Image (cartoon, rainbow, N blue to C red):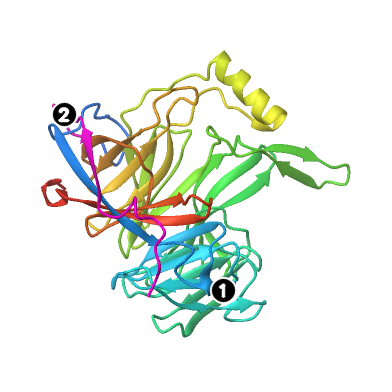
Amino acid sequence: MMRKRFPGIINVSLRLFVTILLATALLTGMNTGKGKATIPTHGQLILEFESQHAVIDSDSSARAMLSFVRDFKMDSRGNFYLLDLKHPGILLFDGKGSFLRQHGKMGKGPGDYMKPARLYIDNRDHIFVYDQGNYNVTGLDPDFKIRLFTRISSPISSNIFVSTNGDIYAFVRDLDQTGPVRRLVEFNEKGERVKTIAGFQDSGFLVKRGKEGGAVMGGMIHEYTPDAYLSPLDKDSFVYGYNLEDKFYLYNTKEQKSRVFPLAVKKSPITGDEKDYFEKKCGKWAMLTVHRPFFKNLLTDDKGRIYVFLVNPVLSEEKSLNIDIFTQKGEYIYRVTSPVIPLSIKDGCLYVLDKDESDNPIIKRFRIKNYASVKC
């Protein structure tokens, strides 16, 4: 039986009042990028959250002590899958947070991992792991039998998506004559790049080219770092975007087409005070762009809704985040304000990465009491 050290978390109720602007417009021109909704289509909403308890913490098992959570996913049965920097494998917990087992060990062969970094779980509960140490993608069935093991030809720098026929989609970082580029690419089952879907000039890295033709890229991650994001939507599609653009995209792997989703945001130049802040924090490695990034993550839920987490000014005293919510058809339906950034949204709950009083990582579950009233 798992011991909990967080009595203050259990049965704590939190009411989050979210102001939603009254809708007067719908998104238009979704395939061309023309037209932009500036007001969400639904009226005022009060979301009520209940903080139930820490579902995963360092007391879950002596064998599963956590140090730095790299990724977290759930399957259709409510089980939790977690990648932690301390463990060379997948940690499996049941829906109550009890530790069940670890799959994998340190190594380079099938079922081995050096630095597992990304997880994807499909609609069949098949598990796919990208190992940043070996550049491998391993595919497992629900019983952890290996169904795919392939070396990727380029290092991956985002979440991954795997189609029903085994193609792997992810962002990679390339270096060409114009500088660093983030490319969304498709890999086949052999790990070969077969298609480039999109490319974005990467402004977040400083490039130093050597005399012999080589180059080194460097940079520091901070609140305004340019980044590319990918989040699975259903078995055939995912959303993606680069946060210096005021839009994101939905890609269907069967149709092999992208749709554009404009955001209701304005371009905001980085101020002098913000430049001073980053100069003290990062020096030359800050690599600031002309304007702030528009968002800091993309996420989807089990109802097919898309969540865009907007960027706060770094010097603002407001710590809550604005989140724009879209349907997969492109309708801008809500702007809400949240005090937490969820790792996952499923079955009416938010799952949030936090820390306990000893600075150890924990995962909390917040249940949305009025989830059924949130319109799709």
The dot on residue 190 is 1
Indicate left or right for 322 with 313 as reference: left
> In this view of the protein, can residue 156 be seen by the observer?
yes
Q: Position of residue 157 (x, y in %)?
A: 56, 53
Mark 2 is on which residue type? Ala
Say which element carries label 2: loop
Answer above or below: position of 232 versus 94: above
Count of numbered tags: 2
Q: Residue at x 32, y 75 (%)?
A: 124
Indicate left or right for 331 with 211 as reference.
left
Q: Nearer the viewer, residue 247 or 350?
A: 350
Q: Which residues are magenta?
A: 1-28
What label sits on residue 220 in the rendered view?
Answer: none
Measured as percent of width and height from the top left, residue 112 is found at: 61, 78
Q: Residues within 10 Å of mark 1 (few under 14, many from 20)?
A: some
**Residue in front for this viewpoint, 64 or 127:** 64
Q: Which residue is mark 2?
A: 25
Q: Position of residue 29 (x, y in %)?
A: 25, 36
The percent coordinates of residue 63 (x first, y second) are 54, 74
Screen quadrant of the N terminus: bottom left
Q: Main secondary structure of the magenta part?
A: loop
Task: Identify the residue at horizontal 46%, vertical 68% (top origin).
Answer: 167
